[in-house]
Amino acid sequence: MLAFLVTLIKVIAPWVAAAVVIHYLNVYNEKKHPEFYNLDDKKTPQSLFENLEIGYPFELAFIMYVGLLFFLICLIGAYVDDQLNWFTGGIFGCLELLAICSVLGTHVWKIWVKGEKIIYRSYTGIKHYYTFADITRVSERLDGGYEFYSGKKKLFRIDNNLSDGAILAGMLQAKKIPCDKAGMTVDKFTLKTRGVYKAVSAMSAGFFCWMVWVMIEQNETSIIFFRPMLALAVISLIIFIDLITDRFSVNGTRVTRRRGLIVKKFDISEIESTRLKKGLFGEKIEFYVKGKCIAKVSTNNQPYDLLDKRIRKEHILRKR
């Protein structure tokens, strides 16, 4: 019993210590920024910042709790059945850690705005105090979220599943604070494959490679399924490498098209026309020089809207 209590104390003590430190850091910050609070006894941001409150909905917290409990049960079940190895433990451990961070985010992470004052409470529970004057740049992420900067320092980020991020960004743009697209402008940008496609491709490549490894370990390389599985593994790896190396960059007037080991460079003034062409995996835009297609890029690549604006800016002919 004593050993159990000692172990329990060892587990709980760091969390209690962290909570105490965070509490006193917040008390110190509140005393350092009294202008953010009323003179009444209410010291909560909710009593002051009624204009805009940004946070995750309870429904998302409920889903995260379900995920947290599910992954914990899987870990305990694997341990009880003596099937907890490094592979199973690593996968479910990472998922459990992600669920814990998500739960903390849905309960702890919050932003309050009133007038030109902002209180930002991070995932750790520490509050930070800003005004609109502290923010010098807003950057819209490729996934639709927003990042807020003071010079080169990132102050905070609002994810794409919170629509209030666009509202706060709009309030700042009304104050003439510049907003760019992931740090890029129409004169300098790089198109990349969407992260979701790369993630799906990576999982597919990992699955087929794992199946090939299992067959080799079980000495089943002569069965009829091995060669097709090996072919799928090679194809999925090639597709994955192609997706992570897919780049279309514009820097001033210079254009660089990179795909795998193939790199093409040309001047944007050399482009005579462009054409949208439907393919197996969606639309692609083709670039023509002297009547010859010299480069293609998917319209699903981000940020395609900057490329579209640059084409319009250069008055490049669009063919059908």
Image (cartoon, rainbow, N blue to C red):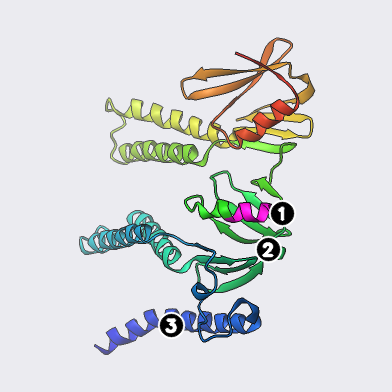
Report how many numbered discs are placed on residues in the image: 3
Residue 36 image point, x, y percent? 61, 76
Q: Is residue 55 left or right of residue 220?
A: right
Nearer the observer, disc 3 or disc 2? 2
Provide the residue span drawn in magenta. Answer: 168-174
Q: Quadrant of the N terminus?
A: bottom left
> What is the quadrant of residue 205 in the picture?
top left
**Three-letter amino acid code at disc 2?**
Phe
Residue 242 showing in the rendered view: yes
Location of residue 144 with respect to 268 vertically, above or below: below
Task: Check residue 16 in the rendering and tell me which mark sits there, or answer none.
Answer: 3
CA–CA distance in space, label 3 to label 2: 34 Å
Residue on which the image places disc 1: 177
Mark 2 neighbour density, 10 Å: few (under 14) some (14–19) many (20 or more): some
Decide whether residue 122 is among the magenta residues.
Answer: no
Nearer the observer, disc 3 or disc 1? 1
